[in-house]
Image (cartoon, rainbow, N blue to C red):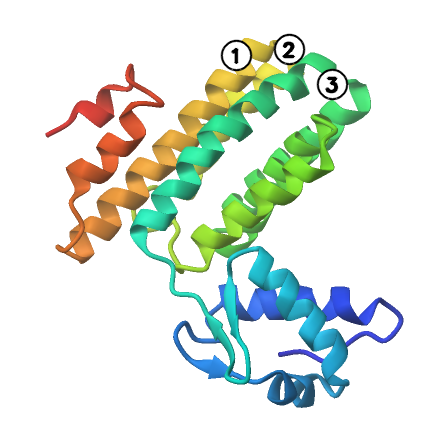
Amino acid sequence: MSSVDRHATLTEQITAQLRAAVLDGTLVPGERYSAGGLAQRFGVSRTPVREALLELERSGLVRIEKNRGVTVVPTSLEAVVDCFQLRLMLEAPAAGRAAAVVDAEGIGEVESRFRAMERAAARDDVGGVLRADRDFHLAVLALADNPRLVKVLEDLRNTVLSRGIATVPQTRSLQELIEDHRDILDGIRNGDPGAAAAAMHRHILNTAILLIRREAAEDPQWDEAALRARLLALAPEHPELRRE
């Protein structure tokens, strides 16, 4: 973990670094850590570390046990499906709201994030594409003008990432991921709430299907058909969900 920038708020800095450590596997799911030990890594007192851990516990990334320390919560595939269900219910309408209220500045911001994805893909930079993907979604959500919704959806995204799964390059190419976002951009750019919401819905659902298929193939304890069926109620028209 990197050192703390003392010009910024300690708790915010440590929260960000602890979250990154969970997502990249530096802090291992199931292992127990102490606030004191983490504070030593950062060279700070225990107080900002405890505050940061409480924030991560609210996000569902860690579990704090009194007098026993903190544990990174292993994320099950069922929990990942739960997260995608919530994203379908919340993020697709938010994209529609964004298209309804967007102005020229907002369109420019979303386009900028999309172009960043394209540039990263041209460099074959998987990490860069995934970061630009995250920034694209955050830019769309910011247009909906609901900070609490942004926080909820960011936590859902982090829960999925904490399992260490992504769809590129294992199940789709970088270019396919970019094309999966193009209709969202078009809907927002055209000021078409229905098109933007439908495109976001398709994108989230496509990502969920690919992840379920890959994870279920690697771990036979998961019933792919049953997991897909949990999404069917939110997208009965999607032909891929009917695949046996």
Instruction: Residue type at mark 2: give it.
Output: Asn
Q: Locate residue 188, reporting x and y percent.
A: 63, 18
Mark 1 and mark 2 residues within 8 Å of each other at the beta carbon: yes
Q: Which residue is mark 1?
A: 195
Instruction: Residue type at mark 3: give it.
Output: Val
Is the C terminus in the top left, top right, bottom left or bottom right quadrant?
top left
Residue in the foreground of this view, choosing between 203 and 233: 233
Does dot 3 land on a helix, a strand or a loop?
Answer: loop
Compared across the picture, whether 204 is left or right of 56 comes to left
Q: Residues within 10 Å of mark 2 (few under 14, many from 20)?
A: some
Numbered label attached to residue 102: 3
Q: Locate residue 176, reporting x and y percent.
A: 40, 35
Residue drawn at (64%, 10%) of the image: 190
Instruction: Residue type at mark 1: give it.
Output: Ala
Q: Earlier in the sequence, mark 3 or mark 1?
A: 3
Residue drawn at (65%, 16%) of the image: 99
Q: Can you tell which of label 1 and label 2 is closer to the viewer?
A: 1
Task: Calculate the distance from the C-alpha at mark 3 to the C-alpha at mark 1.
Answer: 14 Å
Q: Residues within 10 Å of mark 1 (few under 14, many from 20)?
A: many
- Image quarter for residue 110? top right
- Image quarter for residue 66? bottom right
Residue drawn at (57%, 55%) of the image: 59
Q: Which residue is mark 2?
A: 190
Q: Residues within 10 Å of mark 3 (few under 14, many from 20)?
A: some
Q: Earlier in the sequence, mark 1 or mark 2?
A: 2
Residue 72 higher or lower than 235, as above or below: below
Q: Can you tell which of label 3 and label 2 is closer to the viewer?
A: 3
Residue 229 higher or lower than 219, as above or below: above
Residue in the foreground of this view, choosing between 174 and 85: 85
Residue drawn at (69%, 39%) of the image: 148
Numbered label attached to residue 89: none
